[in-house]
Image (cartoon, coloured by chain):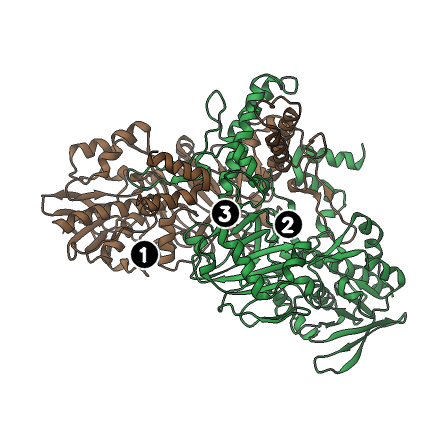
Chain colours: A brown, B green
Amino acid sequence: MTRRSFLEGLGQIGGTSLLLAGMEAFGMGIASAQTAPPPLQGGGKGKKVIILGAGVAGLTSAYELGRAGYDVTVIEARSFAGGRSQTARKGFQLTELGGETQTCQFDDGYYINHGPWRIPFHHRSTLHYVKQFGIEVELFNNDNDNSYIYTTQGKGPLARKPLRKMEVAADARGNAAEILAKVTQSGALDKQFGADDKALFLEYLKTEGYLEGKDYAYRGTEGRGWISKPGAGLHPGVPSKPYAFTDVLDSGAWRVLASVSEWDQQRTMFQPKGGMYMIPTGFVTKGGVGDKIRFSTVVEKIRQNGRTVDVSVVDGTGQRSVVSGDYCICTIPLSVLKSIDNGLSAPKQTAMNGAAYAPVGKIGLQMKRRFWEENHWIYGGHIYTDDMDIVSVSLPSTGWLGPKGVLLGYYQFFANAAKVSALTHAQRTDFALSFGEKVFPEYRDSFETSFSVAWHRVKYNLGGWAMWSDESRARDYPVLLEPDDRIYLAGEHLSYIGGWQAGGIESAWMQIAALHKRASVA
Amino acid sequence: MTRRSFLEGLGQIGGTSLLLAGMEAFGMGIASAQTAPPPLQGGGKGKKVIILGAGVAGLTSAYELGRAGYDVTVIEARSFAGGRSQTARKGFQLTELGGETQTCQFDDGYYINHGPWRIPFHHRSTLHYVKQFGIEVELFNNDNDNSYIYTTQGKGPLARKPLRKMEVAADARGNAAEILAKVTQSGALDKQFGADDKALFLEYLKTEGYLEGKDYAYRGTEGRGWISKPGAGLHPGVPSKPYAFTDVLDSGAWRVLASVSEWDQQRTMFQPKGGMYMIPTGFVTKGGVGDKIRFSTVVEKIRQNGRTVDVSVVDGTGQRSVVSGDYCICTIPLSVLKSIDNGLSAPKQTAMNGAAYAPVGKIGLQMKRRFWEENHWIYGGHIYTDDMDIVSVSLPSTGWLGPKGVLLGYYQFFANAAKVSALTHAQRTDFALSFGEKVFPEYRDSFETSFSVAWHRVKYNLGGWAMWSDESRARDYPVLLEPDDRIYLAGEHLSYIGGWQAGGIESAWMQIAALHKRASVA
């Protein structure tokens, strides 16, 4: 029996937890490798490390290396830390390339996380620092069955109407379960199932689809909502009726359903109270990294000579200087790094071209009242649409029942993001309102002020995140994981958790471990 | 076309929102009747109303009638307001009938809501007061796909093992979708579907079940979890493999799955920060009802004479007195009221026997560390089991990533609750630990202190909530909705939202509206 087949057997018997226990028992340690920073004992103390970029990868590197006794300096082009982990709040400014400067006009206490905005339960690395720095988190509602689906491409009477997700889930699954139960009852699957399993399978379909009676009919369920909900006195409630299954199919609204959410999108998620910038703020204040950052300082040239790395920078006053160190961790996005005079070796230059950076657009809309809560009973979650210029409208998971709220008016990618980003900010706002008012009659009238971003037009990012094709992942990605003599690259782009803070943090953990190993020997 | 068929048509076309709009347009107002308190204009000012019980029904009555100018007095047997809306926290005391007195020993800041503990998004009435009194709420995680299912009655290799809900959901639905897709492909359903719908149906099954390829095979999905999750560097992740479908069926774990959750259990729920007692506290402090409550005062006799209602009470010092008023709202649970010398008419006496009260047990276990978060990555939600002496183990939706936590060790009903409640508190604790340690190896060692309740043994409740059979709902319930001359009954027992605070509130709204209508005429 191979180790692998043994482990697979464990998984079959006892699920993931037994499997992970088995892997730990074998010292495989895969589970734990990514949940805590690497131990950095001895050796490197006093060595100087220059860290380029104060996003979460840079902050992680600075914090952990600093704790291990390294002398770290962080060079950050912006006047604040966090990289893409930004929160647009009153006074926050953003200038897009070739675009206008926006100054966020949200009321005090309101914000939109226009970069990363949610932390899945399995992002152990991000949660490690949440705990480390005592950052207060709250649940992010990533899946709300009372939210709407609004299809624009569908056909039939249910297209272009706001449908509740619970209605669609109940009706699609209920009808499918009814059909399958009838097929099973007819004996057509008897070869497939033994008698015991057939009975269990029918029982499963009945439970799953709220099927009734001996004919296993789906006739609706209270879980899809009520025409009038049950109340006090003589108000038992008026049950809702299922939509015709053919109308549900034609609408396309079922496209949002899945047996279970994708791994990255599972529904137990967090967000820091007050905004995602609380994550970098944790590093800067509680973690003490703030003292080590040279803000508003732009990298112009990177060189190394086999003993030191020398980074030429220009600060906010226009003053030029050279920062030298024993090692460098460069967390600058590849989209930006490849345009800097970076002095990296030819294989690295080639490999950097293997990553494409995602055009991504978001807009926050401050609404003067929370009509989605008050009138539609939707508390957080997403309005789903197949209009790929919008993708989703997301309702805030904070400020419950309060006077105002900032919702996310769109979150589009790729060609759609490129298209929408060509609009002025005022046009983008109008575009977002034009969609939202199809779903919520109160949308446009409630609007007060907005803040938009097109990440591919943001100077020090030039894209939302790195994307690797299968080919470039195999050919270029491994090249960039290896140090270029004394320069180590890190960031979400060097992980399989692209576009998430966890990718940046875990990439930093990997590279500081490698750097430390070398520095300890040297 | 009847009004009803027109409305049904609206529902078919535009979903619940259009339907509700239509109902409002017709002045049917069903939707709004239950979302806000009734307007109480003019008329009754200065009239004296005695309210029996300071649970949420009594508090609602006192607050709204007080605002409308009535002179209200609330008689409450306990030394605090809230009725069943209690929160066990440091120093909280509870004595069960014939049982010991427990004094809660949880650390400061830790608690269990051993009465109502969650507020569904559609409990507009409860949320009305949350907003009115500025009570801070946070999401309650009622559905966590990363939590465990542990079956005790199932068979095969997956029974009596903690399985992740996401694994079971993916595998049950994935296999069912595969079977149905193959049946559909075979042409067996061609009579049922047109060619277009058949194609859409296959596409739906593919999406829903993560089916692959031309053979629509279910081979697992990342959403069911990873053997090793994706990380930085050369860690693309090790995908998990589906369980054998027959093992999933045999385990019985699929019993927790449903197309959509039941109406009362849908996943967007709230809880007040700090504990459910913040709801009554809102009425007492912000609502100003506190001044009107005579605490530790027990009702001994209720009489009326066509002009006044006279309630004989005994206070905490043993002093007896009679409180007289023009009207009375009696929110005492029927289980208790029927043993009081209540002077109600014979039909009411008979009708009161129509409600049975649910035996219900809960136990809070303070754990010295949050092993379910640290080791199992489960943040809130429920561990589901078919052991009906336990029903579920629920993990706290507050204090995320903190040092300790109080979890709910069981929540059983009816005969199971009666059985467990016969144990001493120490025995109940051991019983709860004996189950929990099957799921979590850390359970027993992490235990510090506990607090249990058996509601059927609590003096002023004698049960968790009222239960009506179809027969008694038709025969007895309407009798109790009608006033007994000047006495109006209210509480969750007089609603179709039994066992929820919303039932108590909406019942109070109904009865104060009726009382006011009469008082305005009189």
Residue type at mark 3: give it: Ser
Image quadrant occupied by the C terminus of chain B: bottom right
Counting labels gives 3
The Cα–Cα distance between marks 3 and 2, rounded to whole angstroms, is 25 Å
Measured along the vertical axis of the image, is residue B243 above or below residue B389?
above
Dot label at residue A283: 1
The Cα–Cα distance between marks 1 and 2, rounded to whole angstroms, is 40 Å
Q: Residue B412 in the image: state x and y as whole percent.
A: 63, 54
- Check if mark 3 and mark 2 are on a common chain: yes
Q: Nearer the viewer, residue B239 or B265?
A: B239
* Chain letter of the residue carrying label 1: A
Q: In the visual, does B37 lie left or right of B180?
A: right
Q: Residue B503 in the image: state x and y as whole percent.
A: 70, 56
Q: Residue B163 in the image: state x and y as whole percent.
A: 49, 43
Task: Determine the secondary structure under disc 3.
Answer: loop
The Cα–Cα distance between marks 1 and 3, rounded to whole angstroms, is 31 Å
Label 2, on which residue? B122
Mark 1: give few (<14), some (14-19) or many (20+) Cα within 10 Å. many
Q: Is there a contact, CB below 8 Å, between mark 1 and mark 2?
A: no
Measured along the vertical axis of the image, is residue A255 above or below residue A440?
above
* Chain letter of the residue carrying label 3: B
Label 3, on which residue? B147
